[in-house]
Image: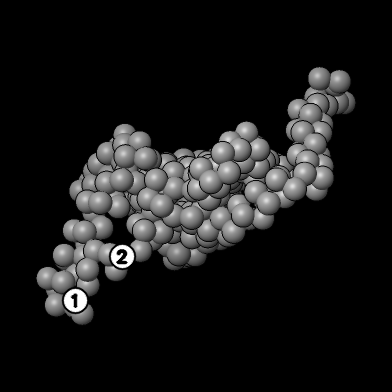
Amino acid sequence: MQTRGDFPWWLVAASALGLYFLWRIVSDDLYSQVLTTLSRGVAITLFVTVVGFALASLLGLLLALGSTARWLVVRQAVRFYVEIVRGIPILVLLLYVAFVLAPFLVELWNLIGLPEARTRDFPLIWRAILALVIGYSAFIAEVFRAGLLSVDPGQIEAAKALGLSSWQRFRLIVLPQAIKTILPPLGNDFIAMIKDSSLVSVLGVLDITQLGKVTAAGNFRYFETYNVVAFLYLAMTIGLSLLLRRLERHLNRKP
């Protein structure tokens, strides 16, 4: 039975705040102009987040599998990567990748003998995505590792006894059970990446935050402009948070 304390009053308050800003956007020409300008950055923010998170999840899964490998050198190499990357702030990692790693990769590209490239040929948006992939893959690797280790070893041994291959054991036994453990923190990392994607504005990438900075510098209406910036981020993060909670409850109801 749900108690009165369980009622999501926070959601009611957040919805009321959202409706207020929607009313201001509809009724106030300044808010409408700012929203029209910033809406161009929504696509960039979502592109950086979705592509970055997909690649970070793939790399994180490979790192998690490496952390459970039989070979000591592989496990230690993965642990080295995870601990070093997790200790670097995302902003510092973003600047390092953009101005140190990217030029190095371009030089390496030229040394291999491929068609000559220059550092400016490496778009800033892809430098930002690479930084997010490196940074978040270390955190996601730990999420996957915890999920994989949560599966009862006895079931894996039973699958081996039935003659299932490593891929079949992973696909049919391990992953379906691990997903319930993996999904909540993985969803939280996705929401966190939406917020951290705002850091790409330091490279001049025209996401929501960068367009907000440019707009505010032009109209000097910082209050209204950053209200719209915050509204756009909150609409995405709270909406995704509610969707993930619903998906989590659906998975928990499954036998």
Q: Nearer the viewer, residue 101 or 153?
A: 101
Where is residue 249 shown, x and y percent of the image? 73, 42
The reply to whether discs 1 and 2 touch (Cβ–Cβ < 8 Å) is no
Where is residue 156? Give x, y as percent.
48, 52
Q: Nearer the viewer, residue 55 or 58?
A: 55
Name the side, left or right, on which 179 lies relative to 15. left
Badge 1 element = loop
Q: Residue furthest left?
A: 111
Which mark sits nearer the N-terminus, 1 or 2? 1
**Residue 183 showing in the rendered view:** yes
The residue that disc 1 covers is 116
Query: Percent from the top left, x then y, of residue 44?
Result: 53, 58
In the image, which disc is placed on residue 106?
none
Give the class, few, some or many, for how many residues have Cα within 10 Å of label 1's Cα (few <14, many ≥20).
few
- Using the image, tell me which numbered label, if any, was put on residue 122: 2
Q: Residue furthest front?
A: 219
Q: Quadrant of residue 122?
A: bottom left
Residue 106: x and y, percent?
21, 65
Screen quadrant of the N terminus: top right
Residue 141 in sight from this viewpoint: no
* Secondary element at tag 2: loop
Question: Which scheme is used to colour this image of the protein?
Answer: one colour
Instruction: Give, as a three-letter code, the residue at label 1.
Output: Glu
Measure how far apart labels 1 and 2 are at the Cα level.
12 Å
